[in-house]
Amino acid sequence: MEVKVLVVEDAQDMNRLIVKTLKKAGYSVDGCFDGEEALAYLLGAEYDAILLDIMMPKLDGYGLLKQLREKGIETPVMFLTARDAVADRVKGLDYGADDYLVKPFDFDELLARIRAMTRKRAGSRSNQFCIADLTIDVKQMTASRNGVQISLLPKEFSILEYMIRNQGVVLSREQLENQIWNYEYSGSSNNIDVYISRLRKKIDNGHRVKLLHTIRGIGWVLREEEMGETQ
């Protein structure tokens, strides 16, 4: 069955690039450049997914999403934005977003997120993600393992959320830095190592099945293994 996607992005070059990439991947795609135009599209046709910028003329992404949910339109929405603050992400989730990808992003990851988002539409909408006995709720910003709550700092939670959304995928240092701090970040290159080390202790210590693994020379991966790779 053909999957129909609406791309709402006011930067015309980016809009066209995303549309071209999705069409090449086999999707049926429409593109528009502001929130009011997008609302007209969405009231006139059904889509399986919406890729939505936040900062747009006439009607921004938050306002558009709020109107859609108030009208009972439950089409899955992924925000594509350079705004990576935790408050921005929480606001989007509160309005009913399903996912959040920070620019610049990898198109292979974008396609994987769309596949996951459209698969999820067949079931109930949920802000919870699980791997083994680890569960996170991205709306409540809580994490637990085997029912025991885990206390995480905001950046630790952001890294864990990104990894659990991409569980099984080896993520490089650059991908994590771009996702958590965005491409303008110029801090210490070992900050990710510090956060990963603390995160591993919080989610894996005392558990036989290890979830956060280091892939030497490449990056890190969240997957279920009784014996971790190089830690």
Image: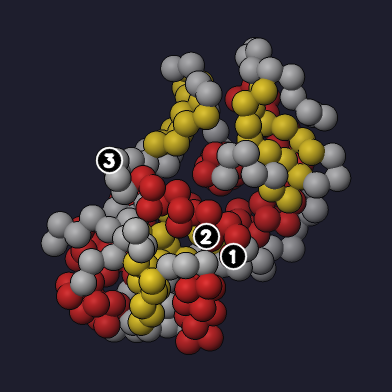
Mark 1 lies on a secondary structure that is helix
Instruction: Please tell me which residue is depicted at 37% across the width and 41% down the height of the picture.
Output: 127
- Image coordinates of residue 34 in percent, x first then y, are 33, 82
What residue is shown at x 73% (from left), y 50% (from top)?
172
Q: Are marks 2 and 1 in contact (CB under 8 Å)?
A: yes
Can I make out residue 56 in this image? no
Foreground of the two, 179 or 16: 16
**CA gap, disc 2 and disc 3:** 21 Å
Disc ID at residue 228: none
Residue that lies at the very extreme toward the front in this rendered image: 1
Quadrant in which the C terminus is drawn = top right
Q: Residue at x 76, y 45 (%)?
A: 219
Tell me which label, 2 or 3, sits earlier in the chain.
2
Specify the label residue 124 is tagged with.
3
* Direction from residue 194 to residue 211 in the image, left or right: left
Who is closer to the viewer here, 115 or 64? 115
Residue 224 placement: quadrant: top right
